[in-house]
Image (cartoon, grey):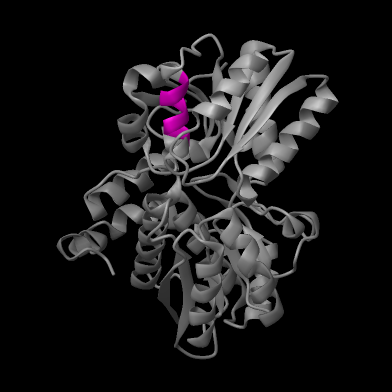
């Protein structure tokens, strides 16, 4: 599952990763399981489809974590074995993938990648009483009414709406905004959060235009927004669409309307984003992002900075490529949370793993992960970092 020419690096870097693993090991005592056993966990990510670069990073980081956990025997008496499936970035395919890993006897699931996929599989895993740590945002019914076996590695859609709005407010003090959003579950959910926040803050929403994830021409929506003359445009979407929006906005001469975007705009990585948008069109773009997307420019005071520095350098050494976005942190933190829960529970019983996940308090590379009976998303709005695109690089910059 690891790339052949790089697998030797995993062993060589075990000592280095011990620093990261120490955070996991130090959390609690190590109760022993009754006997050595192989424990199967599902890894369901987008290995194809519109966010495949994100899903591939999630998978590879999860496999890296599993390899280190097994090599260092961090769960006494247990060896984790991943069952990997492709959710194709599609909710229907995610359901098929989940059924496949369930048939093989997994005790927990990491994934799927997308918000829509996470929402589609959550009721299935809840009914089977198999704990999941979704990689997509928790949205819709599963966000409003938490399910006992469903957890998320991210923030909520309301958190992203708040982070985007707060950044726009600090930068531009807008009296009006426009929203350009994907019409999938993620985009609609964050849009609805933005609408509610804007109303509460007394900021007019003069346009709210939607597009499909696979659309390539957003000029009609942008023309409508230009006519509405907002003080700020907030974009919500992933895949290639956000970069196309930046390019087409520039081509339409809409440079007087500043653009603020969320972290999913860079889900396929900065390089691919800039290859589509163009460096000149993207210059000055402001974003509320996950810390991993600007890991090498975070201030030293950020508690995630040392972990990110170590982890992402190891990821690059192991796979021979840079991370394309925030996927590696999601995959890595999810596995570490699950492994810590199995170890603290002293059991591979799904119900006991679930109980232990709910008691998680783990400083990861994305945020300090905590869950409660009513909060199933590990991160929150305060975990976003402000960023700006400068000379073809996304860097940290406080407003």
The span picked out in magenta is 242-249
Residue at 64%, 75% in the rendered image: 125
Q: Quadrant of residue 305?
A: top left
Where does the image place residue 93, in percent across and percent down from the top left? 50, 69
Above/below status of 42 relative to 188: below
The answer to whether residue 265 is left or right of residue 48 is: right
Where does the image place residue 69, in percent across and percent down from the top left? 40, 68
Residue at 64%, 51% in the rendered image: 185
Does the image show residue 229?
A: yes
Residue at 64%, 29% in the rendered image: 179
Residue extending furthest toward the front: 220
Q: Please tell me how many numbered marks the rendered image carries.
A: 0
Where does the image place residue 120, in percent across and percent down from the top left? 63, 66
Compare residues 64 and 234 and report the one nearer the observer: 234
Above/below status of 95 relative to 270: below
The answer to whether residue 195 is left or right of residue 320 is: right
Compare residues 18 and 358 and report the one nearer the observer: 358
Where does the image place residue 71, in percent across and percent down from the top left? 33, 71
């Amino acid at each position: 599952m690891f790339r052949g020419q790089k697998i030797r690096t995993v062993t060589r870097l075990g000592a280095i990763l011990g620093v990261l693993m120490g955070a996991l090991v130090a959390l609690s005592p190590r109760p022993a399981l009754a006997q050595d056993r192989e424990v199967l966990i599902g890894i369901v990510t987008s290995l194809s489809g519109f966010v495949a670069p994100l899903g591939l990073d999630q998978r590879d980081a999860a496999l890296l974590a599993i390899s280190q956990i097994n090599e260092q025997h961090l769960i006494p008496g247990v060896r984790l074995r991943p069952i990997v499936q492709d959710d194709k970035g599609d909710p229907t395919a995610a359901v098929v993938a989940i059924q496949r890993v369930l048939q093989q006897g997994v005790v927990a699931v990491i994934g799927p990648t997308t918000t829509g996929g996470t929402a589609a599989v959550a009721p299935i895993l809840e009914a089977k009483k198999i704990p999941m740590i979704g990689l997509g945002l928790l949205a819709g019914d599963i966000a409003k009414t938490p399910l006992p076996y469903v957890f998320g590695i991210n923030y909520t859609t309301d958190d992203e709406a708040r982070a985007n709005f707060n950044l726009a407010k600090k930068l531009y003090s807008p009296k009006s905004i426009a929203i350009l959003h994907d019409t999938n579950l993620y985009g609609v959910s964050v849009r609805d959060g933005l609408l509610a926040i804007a109303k509460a803050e007394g900021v007019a929403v003069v346009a709210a235009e939607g597009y499909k994830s696979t659309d390539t021409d957003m000029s009609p929506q942008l023309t409508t927004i230009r006519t509405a003359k907002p003080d700020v445009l907030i974009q919500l979407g992933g895949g290639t669409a956000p970069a196309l929006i930046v390019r087409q906005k520039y081509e339409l001469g809409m440079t007087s309307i500043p653009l603020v975007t969320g972290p999913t705009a860079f889900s396929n990585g900065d390089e691919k984003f800039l290859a589509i948008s163009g460096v000149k069109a993207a210059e000055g773009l402001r974003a509320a992002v996950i810390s991993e997307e600007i890991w090498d420019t975070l201030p030293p005071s950020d508690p995630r900075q040392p972990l990110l520095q170590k982890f992402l350098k190891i990821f690059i050494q192991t796979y021979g490529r840079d991370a394309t976005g925030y996927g590696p942190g999601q995959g890595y933190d999810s596995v570490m949370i699950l492994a810590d829960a199995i170890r603290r529970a002293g059991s591979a019983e799904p119900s006991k793993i679930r109980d232990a996940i709910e008691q998680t308090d783990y400083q990861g590379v994305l945020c300090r992960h905590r869950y409660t009976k009513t909060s199933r998303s590990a991160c929150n709005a305060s975990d976003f970092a402000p960023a700006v695109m400068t000379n073809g690089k996304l860097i940290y910059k406080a407003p």
